[in-house]
Amino acid sequence: MKAVIAEIITIGDEILYGQIVDTNSAWMGTELTGIGVKVKQITSISDNATHIVQALNDARSRADIILITGGLGPTKDDLTKHVLADYFHTSLKLHEPSLADIAALFQNRGIELTELNRQQAFLPVSCTAVRNVLGTAPGMWFEQEGKVFVSMPGVPFEMKRMMTDTVLPQLKAHFRTPHILHKVIQTVGLAESILAERLEAWETSLPEHLKLAYLPNLGGVRLRLTGQGDDEAALEEELQGQVEKLPGLIGKYIFAYGEVPLEEAIGRMLQERGLTMATAESCTGGFLAHKITSVPGSSAWFQGGLIAYHNAVKTQELHIKPETLQQHGAVSEAVVRAMAENVRRKLGTDIGLATSGIAGPDGGTPEKPVGTIWIACADKDKTVAKMLSYNKSRLLNIEYTAVAVLNLLRQSLGAGVEE
């Protein structure tokens, strides 16, 4: 079955100026994939008639579906509707159902309907209106030479409601599409290049309709295996069969299947074992606890944490001996081990995690440069500590450290030992 290709065009100077982030395209890409449509290009352009026309011409030469967001407001800089009317050689005419929706919306809000908002109910004669139940700008569906063009507002919640209620069902009915399925494999602790080397033979053997993507993130790589085919059940079985080969190749680095963050995967492991944990943070300043408590239900396995940023807090709250700090320094194996062990005892948990380091941009020395970080994981039987050396920005040093200490915990639970 022939692939159905879509392009997304986002219109708005505010996107190009960096004043807002285009989250619409990512959401649309996910939803289009769900109905078997491939997005091949996303283009952001200014509120300029010439640019809009050029983008439309370029997109129609490559795609079957062109989805447009933005530029449908009531002000003078909102040009999209007028450009589309010229583009499809038609005129604007009052669309009574849209006017009724707009009037009802204003009435419910207790606001007088202005002439500018009434003008939003004027639509190109050749389009099919796409109802907007949450805003004042109707969408527009055009068909020409086998291509479908859909224009929608840039406001995310309005666009999403239009897509869900109308656009996606109509696209699915209009085009005969293959099934597109994804399998996501989450890994941590192995660089993308090394991971690719280990998977090279397996990846090379994949059939043409299965594709592997490497998606690096902080301290890990998301693997996305994508398949396309006419038989959904057969495709699902084929993808799963390929995924089941991966534990034999990179098993110790896999922490989850699907869109599961590391902290959630670790929480599941702790719950399965009936274990609890606590944190003692210096250089991460509470970021580790933030990641953990972002997981719904984390109170079942996370007791709490201490931010022992100043040495006085390390001695008073975590009972680190002053002579240990004096002899080894706060950024040392001796101190971070004691932090992990003592927070575990203080909060009565099975496991204690600790971080201490020089996040930067200053504070380093020749012996301990910026990016020198110690992490530790303690349980009732042992304490494991590790030194990290990151040459990154302050925030990235903090984020990488949080991932690294969570992975240290994962390994201590027997889920993988670094080579």
Image (cartoon, grey):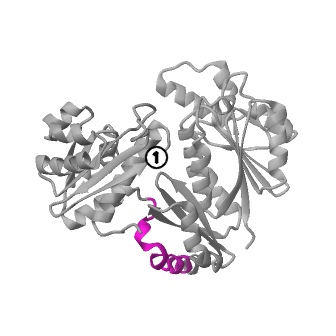
Residue at point 61% right, 62% down?
Answer: 35
The answer to whether residue 249 is magenta is yes
Q: Is residue 88 above or below residue 264?
A: above
Question: In screen coordinates, is 269 left or right of 245?
Answer: left
Instruction: Please state the extent of the stretch shown in magenta in the rendering.
Output: 236-259
Residue at point 58% right, 28% down?
Answer: 103
Residue found farthest to the right? 89
* Residue situated in front as seen by the camera: 301 or 360: 360
Q: Is residue 335 above or below residue 76?
A: below
The x and y percentages for residue 21 are 58, 36
Residue picked out by circle 1: 390
Principal secondary structure, stretch drawn in magenta? helix
* Residue situated in front as seen by the camera: 21 or 200: 200
Q: Is residue 370 above or below residue 74?
A: below
The quadrant in which residue 127 appears is top right
Q: Is residue 290 visible?
A: yes
The x and y percentages for residue 277 are 21, 53
The x and y percentages for residue 197 are 58, 70
Question: In screen coordinates, is 294 left or right of 202?
Answer: left
Q: Is residue 182 visible?
A: no
* Residue situated in front as seen by the camera: 8 or 288: 288
The x and y percentages for residue 275 are 19, 61
Crowding at dot 1, Cα within 10 Å, few <14 / some 14-19 / many 20+, comes out as: some
The quadrant in which residue 99 appears is top right
Residue at point 62% right, 37% down?
Answer: 154
The answer to whether residue 193 is magenta is no
The quadrant in which residue 170 appears is bottom right
Image quadrant containing the C terminus: bottom left
Q: Secondary structure at mark 1?
A: loop
Amino acid type for the residue under numbered disc 1 = Tyr
